[in-house]
Image (cartoon, rainbow, N blue to C red):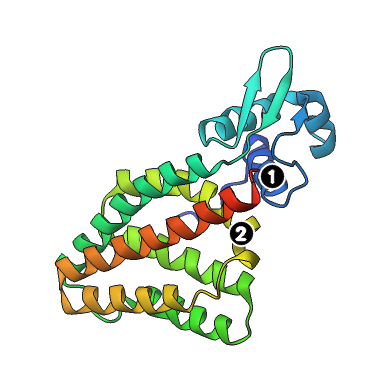
Amino acid sequence: MASKQTDKPVSSSQRALMELREMIFAGYLPAGSDHLETELAEQLKMSRTPVREAILMLEGQGLLQMRPRKGVRILPLSPEDMAEIYDVLTELESLAAENAAAFGYSAQNLSGLAQAIDDMDHAIKGPDLQAWARADNRFHKELVRLGGNRRAQAIVDMMSDQVRRARATTLTLRPLPTKSNADHRKVYQAIKEGDRSVARETHRAHRRHAKQIIVDILAKHSLRFV
């Protein structure tokens, strides 16, 4: 008789990682601020060991920097940072769109993309920009998954955190993202029809446009902290 599977418990370092990430994104640990490991461990009510492990992982994700004898600094995002990140995301996601179009997915396989687009359209009518951002995140994550390249997925996942930080600050300062929704629907249709070239080039143009909006806002308002 097979044993019943149970969910693997979350380790202390994993919990510290998740909680510190949310504290950074929510602004409880503002960009540019400095913190001691002992201070963070006290806030999380944990020992220093799992907190230090979480800090090392977050450093690898570009969210903070460990400095000898000075503790941890939460890293800011600059327009230059975002320009570089978007350049990489643009190429990887455009490749994913092209690959997805080549795989001949059924409508059922593409239901995740379709639902994300529908949710974005519904959010725009509110408008509910937070709901739109969540649906937009789902679209991009699902697009990369459908591209079938696990290494590309890992890189995009790492960089998507930085995009999330910047967007949290610029979301209410950008135009209502109706064009973004239309772009997503064109990419979806191209993938559904197996048109690799249109899927790739439409998504590339979309990401380049999004890059320009966010970089311009960051530069104009000097929004280097979230």
- 1 or 2: tag closer to the N-terminus: 1
Residue drawn at point x = 58 percent, y = 87 percent: 125
Up-down: is 144 above or below 55?
Answer: below
Answer yes or no: is residue 72 visible: yes
Mark 2 surroundings within 10 Å by alpha-carbon count, few (fewer than 14), some (14 through 19), many (20 or more): some
Up-down: is 29 above or below 208?
Answer: above
* Residue 54 sits in quarter: top right
Query: Alpha carbon of mark 1 to alpha carbon of mark 2: how far?
Result: 16 Å
Up-down: is 94 above or below 123?
Answer: above
Residue 29: give x, y in percent of width and height: 75, 41
Near-viewer residue (169 or 139):
169
Q: Which residue is mark 2?
A: 170
Q: Is residue 57 left or right of residue 118?
A: right
**Mark 2: which amino acid?**
Thr
Give the number of marks.
Answer: 2
Q: Dot 2: what SS?
A: helix
Residue 45: give x, y in percent of width and height: 83, 36
Quadrant (top left/top right/bottom left/bottom right) for the N terminus: bottom left
Q: Which residue is mark 1?
A: 24
Extreme residue toward the top, this view: 69
Extreme residue toward the front, this view: 220
**Mark 1: which amino acid?**
Ile
